[in-house]
Each structure stands twice: as structure tokens, then as C-alpha cells.
Image (tube, rainbow, N blue to C red):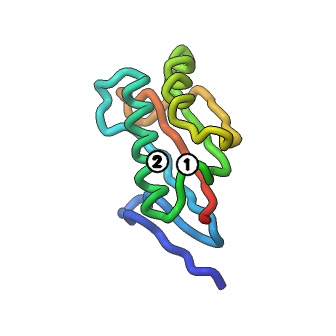
Amino acid sequence: MSELKRLHVGGRLSEAAIHNGVVYLAGQVPDDDSKDIRGQTAEVLGMVDRLLAEAGSDKSRILNVQIFLADLTDFAGMNTVWDAWVAPGNSPPRATVQARLTHPGWKIEIVVTAALP
């Protein structure tokens, strides 16, 4: 049976779970809600990079991404940052939807699933 490993385990959630060669990240949200969509997107993608590295993976191995935007008018700004970040030739399947996020200052939440090498 494959080992199940969790990273940054809290009382309510873990930031990541690793099982059967797959890394599952919890929804990543910005720490600084005073930033605009570009700033919040860059911050969250940085969190994704760090968690994937800690798990032993990276953005070129992403299998699926779900992006939640509080306001769809931020879609273009988010995509500007995303397009500069995504690994060339490795654009993952992605869905982007509008959602009411749990903190009023958050503009974005990103959920990632990635493969281990």
C-alpha cells in the first residue's frame, strides 16, 4: 500500500497531501489582501511553487488547476500573471470560475494537483 504523506497539517486542513505519486494542494489564497489581482495571483502562485517543491514536484508536472475568482472582471489581470508563470509547453488543464470567497479581501483561490517525478 502506498504511503500517505501530509504537509503543514493543521486542525482544519493540510496544505498538501501526497499519495500514489500525486500531490494534492489545498486551495491557496493570498496572505496580503491589500494587493490587486496581479499581486494576489503572483503571491498565490509563489505559494504553489513552494508547496510543490517541498513535495518534490514543480509547475511543469501540474495535472489540473482550479482557479476561483471573486470577480470575473479580474480574469484578464489574473491571466497576465498566469501566462508569465506557467511552464512553457506544459500548460495544464484548467478551469476558472467566479465564486464568493470566504474572506472579503481575497480576489483569488487556486487549487492544484500535480504528479511527482
Q: Position of residue 65 (x, y in %)?
A: 62, 43
Residue count near mark 2 (Cα–Cα under 10 Å), binned few <14, some 14–19, many ≥20: many
* Image quadrant assignment for residue 53: bottom left
Q: Which residue is mark 2?
A: 48
Q: Residue visible at 43% across and 23% down?
A: 37
Q: CA distance from mark 2 to mark 1?
A: 8 Å
**Secondary element at image label 2:** helix
Q: Residue visible at 45% across and 44% down?
A: 28
Q: Are marks 2 and 1 in contact (CB under 8 Å)?
A: yes
On the rendered image, what quadrant is the C terminus found in? Answer: bottom right
Q: Residue visible at 61% across and 55% down?
A: 114
Q: Residue visible at 49% across and 27% down?
A: 81
**Secondary element at image label 1:** helix
**Does 72 sit above or below residue 88?**
above
**Does 66 sit above or below residue 17?**
above
Q: Is residue 112 left or right of residue 44?
A: right
Under mark 2, the amino acid is Val
* Image quadrant assignment for residue 116: bottom right
On the rendered image, what quadrant is the N terminus found in? Answer: bottom right
Disc on res. 59? 1
Residue count near mark 1 (Cα–Cα under 10 Å), binned few <14, some 14–19, many ≥20: many
Q: Is residue 20 left or right of residue 55?
A: right
Q: Can residue 41 be seen in this snapshot? A: yes
